[in-house]
Amino acid sequence: MRESIFRGPAMISHLVKTISEKYPEKQVGKTFIQKMVYLLAREGTADFDYSMYHYGPYSGQVSEELGFSENIGAVEIDWAPHKGYFIKSKDTSWEQYLNESDKRVIDEIVNKYGEFGAIELSIITTTLFIQDNFAVKDKNELIHVVASLKSQHTEAGIDDILKKARVIQ
């Protein structure tokens, strides 16, 4: 089966809808979407190129898909001064472009990481990016590398977030 041009917006719409249903008070913004889609990409559900950026792994392709999702009415993106972006699922009919496996993986990622905010997800995904791309396996070295990239966070704080997310033991 040929992949539809609407698969990306469908994935984003379903992700936003699922997060909003499970965590109705959660602010879903652009950074949050970038990190959650990165986690989906690690599972093989999304196919986007990522590079390291100030807030962790970033994909220009995901940014484009998010804009496309807004343009076709799959999501609504609002900006609130001093609060950031608020993304809401607008039209769930786009989900027809996802298969059941896609939906299941999105649900699993939401269940595993949905409780975290954008800042915590930035630390989690930065850690996973470093593990995946630079083969840093030692826990202490990994935390030290992440702390050097996220200098506003302490190594102890990073360690706590990674343990809570079960990224490290």
Image: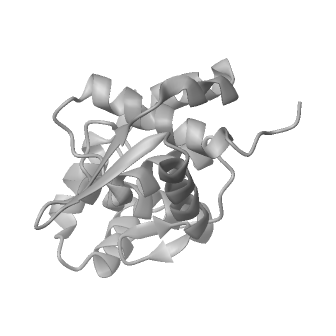
* Location of residue 157 in the rendering, given as x and y in whole percent from the top left corner: 16, 60
Whether residue 44 appears in this view of the structure is no
Q: Residue furthest front?
A: 72
Q: Nearer the viewer, residue 70 or 4?
A: 70
Q: Out of 100 and 141, give the one closest to the viewer.
A: 100
Residue 100, position as x, y percentages in the image? 65, 18
The residue at the far left in this view is: 82
Q: Looking at the image, which residue is at 16% across and 70% down?
A: 154
Residue 101 versus residue 27 in the image, above or below: above
Q: Quadrant of the N terminus?
A: top right
What is the quadrant of residue 7 in the picture?
top right
Q: Is residue 112 left or right of residue 25?
A: right
Question: How was the colour assigned to the protein in this rendering?
Answer: one colour
Q: Is residue 70 left or right of residue 150?
A: right
Q: Is residue 126 above or below residue 69?
A: below
Looking at the picture, tell me which residue is in the foreground, 49 or 71: 71
The residue drawn where x is 24% and y is 49% is 117
Q: Position of residue 112 (x, y in %)?
A: 38, 32
